[in-house]
Image (cartoon, rainbow, N blue to C red):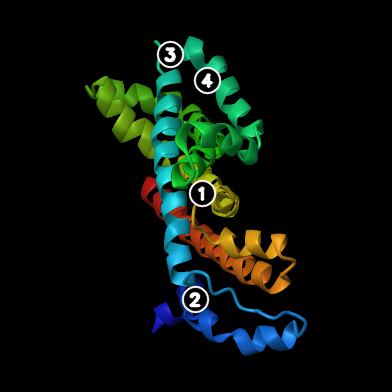
Amino acid sequence: MRWLKDPLLWLVILYLALLSAMPYSAPLFAHWFPELARPLYQQDSFWQLTLAHLFLVVTASLLAIVIGVGSGVAVTRRSGRAFRPLIETIVAAGQTVPPVAVLAIAVPVMGFGAWPAIVALLLYGLLPILQGTLAGIDSVPASSREIARGVGMNAWQRLWQVELALAAPVIIAGIRTSVIINIGTAAIASTVGAKSLGSPVIIGLSGFNTAYVIQGALLVALLAIVSDRLFERLQRWFSLNER
């Protein structure tokens, strides 16, 4: 019965219950906003919007993890250290460019749809992952590296079994930040024709329909909270295993 006290479980149940109940909440929003002719967003299923939102975030995050962690590892090797300032500057510059500007540049090249949004999310999510990777690898004690070298580990084994293993909690923290940022930022994907939980928000803002905005924003916020708790659990697991 201990699992019943897990707050993550109840957050997931709350989110699923909210998704299931949202199509039947028209009377509630009609009561709150009696001036609106259509108080409930009905253009798309909220389940479909959630899956589309997750597709954007997961795809962009996986690409960002591969590029961010890979770049972080590369510039901490002896042969790549000279490129570290350059990589950090480029990735930081990507973080400073507003996602809307990235969309404006990507749409003429890639067309409307999910992929311009994925590119924007990828650029926006790289910096926390790169910084987490660099901080995690830099925090590995030199003595641990020397011991690994002394027992005969090759460079790949030292990287995988020592450096990345010890740096994992910090790297996960960077990924956690990146994913949470992208869950909120993915709402703007609807401005370029991609389905997401931002669709009710964008339509609500353009049509002065506050109910739509609340419906989309509530689901995005709760999804971010659930994801944050999942990563907190993952980070704790890596920290315990490190000991």
Q: Identify the mark at residue 19; answer none if there is no mark.
A: 2
Q: Earlier in the sequence, mark 1 or mark 3?
A: 3
Q: Is 81 above or below relative to 172?
A: above
Q: Nearer the viewer, residue 74 or 142?
A: 74
Q: Identify the mark at residue 80; answer none if there is no mark.
A: 3
Q: Secondary structure at mark 1?
A: helix
- Percent position of residue 14, x then y: 51, 78
Q: Is 180 above or below relative to 32?
A: above
The amino acid marked with disc number 3 is Gly
Within 10 Å of disc 4 (Cα), the crowding (few <14, some 14-19, many 20+) is: some
Within 10 Å of disc 3 (Cα), the crowding (few <14, some 14-19, many 20+) is: few
What quarter of the picture does the N terminus occupy?
bottom left
The amino acid marked with disc number 2 is Leu
- Percent position of residue 177, x then y: 56, 47
- Percent position of residue 104, x then y: 60, 36
Which residue in the protein does label 1 denote? 179
Q: Is residue 76 visible?
A: no
Instruction: Name the residue located 54 percent from the left edge and 54 percent from the top edge.
Output: 183
Q: Earlier in the sequence, mark 1 or mark 2?
A: 2
Q: Are marks 1 and 2 in contact (CB under 8 Å)?
A: no
